[in-house]
Amino acid sequence: MTTKNISITNQKSDSVNYESNSDTKSKISYQWVFDLNKVNSCEYDNLTFPSIQKRWNIYKQRGKLLGVAAFYEKNMVGLVIGECLANTTKAEIISLFVEPNYRHQGIGTNLIQYLEKGLIKVGCKQVQVHYKTSKITPTDFEPLLTNCGWKQPQTKMILGFGNLENIAAKAPWLNHLSQYQLPSDLEIFLWKDLTQSEREEILKTQKEKPWYPEVLSPFYPDFRLETINSLGLRYQGKVVGWMINHRVSEDTIRYSTLFVAKEFQRSGKAMLLLAKSMRLQSESSIPFGKSAVQIENQSMLRIVSRHLTPYLIEQTESRFTKKDLVVV
């Protein structure tokens, strides 16, 4: 493993309190990894989860990176990377990985405990982590966090992933709604054709009398806005809804924000926007779609459960937890 432009410093393993008679455990050592950045951290991509390289393809670095590596003899077998959020006293764990043959031996726990101590030294008072659930989450990752004194994880979103061609072929509602003809006073249009005056009007009316939750704003600054199937809904020439999507990878579109004004929420217009948008993607060369619905949005969760879940490849949860760091 190359360590060019990265500082690795020996750290005595007795600063982490655990006892074991395991011969493997007795040969594990831990070292600080300093001077990490978006470029050189990718040298460790095969020892990161989620992939650090994929992360930097999407997100900007928000502050100083600090890592702790676990070694068995001279081989790196585990790595945790934390990011200190600039202008705050908070940090976030952005990657944690232990080689499969070395799991369930306390290495992950020790990596986190070392990182917590390092974060305290650089002035962080809280550390957090966002993660997607998997089959091993309740047996591996969450017990590890519990052992380290983290708060009970909270589900923030329900995540879905599917193949649009498969959904289009099997979901009868999609075929029915995507062919529905709107009355003359309603119009669905591509969001990329939104005019500047319409944008200004949406923002003006929202400021004067809020009519949509800010979390459902169509103007969230994300350069990945997908133009082929992000849609708007006009009623008598006025914008009253939208389906905003983002290209999160070359082959995947995320269905990010679906909203229609209150007077249209019980008329099926939200489902119509969703159907039209999904149909446009199914006719493109982009095979996969994903969604993230906030746990508080019960009406949308019911739509997903009834109309999408049966046709998805995968449905998981996005969870969040944190720990207040205390100087000992």
Image (cartoon, helix red, strand yellow):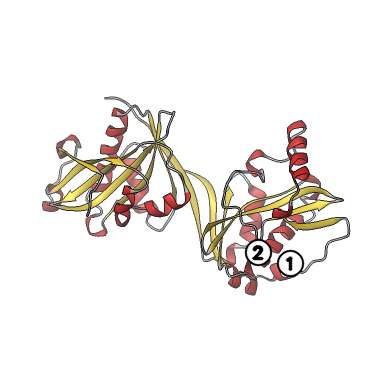
At label 1, which amino acid type do we have?
Ser
Q: Which residue ends up furthest to the top in the rendered image?
A: 328
- Whichever of labels 1 and 2 marks the residue nearer the N terminus, that label is 1
Which residue position is annotated with label 1?
178
Do the residues under discs 1 and 2 have CB atoms within 8 angstroms?
Answer: yes
* Residue 50 in sight: no
Q: What element carries label 1?
A: helix
How many dots with numbers?
A: 2
Residue 218: x and y in percent read: 67, 46
At label 2, which amino acid type do we have?
Met
**Front residue (pair 158, 201):** 201
**Front residue (pair 252, 4):** 4
User: How busy is the neighbourhood of tag 2: few (under 14 within 10 Å), some, or many (20 plus)?
Assistant: many
Q: What element carries label 2?
A: helix
Q: Distance between the residues labelled 1 and 2?
A: 8 Å
- Name the residue at 54% across, 52% down: 158
Which residue position is annotated with label 2?
278
* Residue 237 in sight: yes
The image shows residue 219, relative to residue 274, as above or below, that is: above
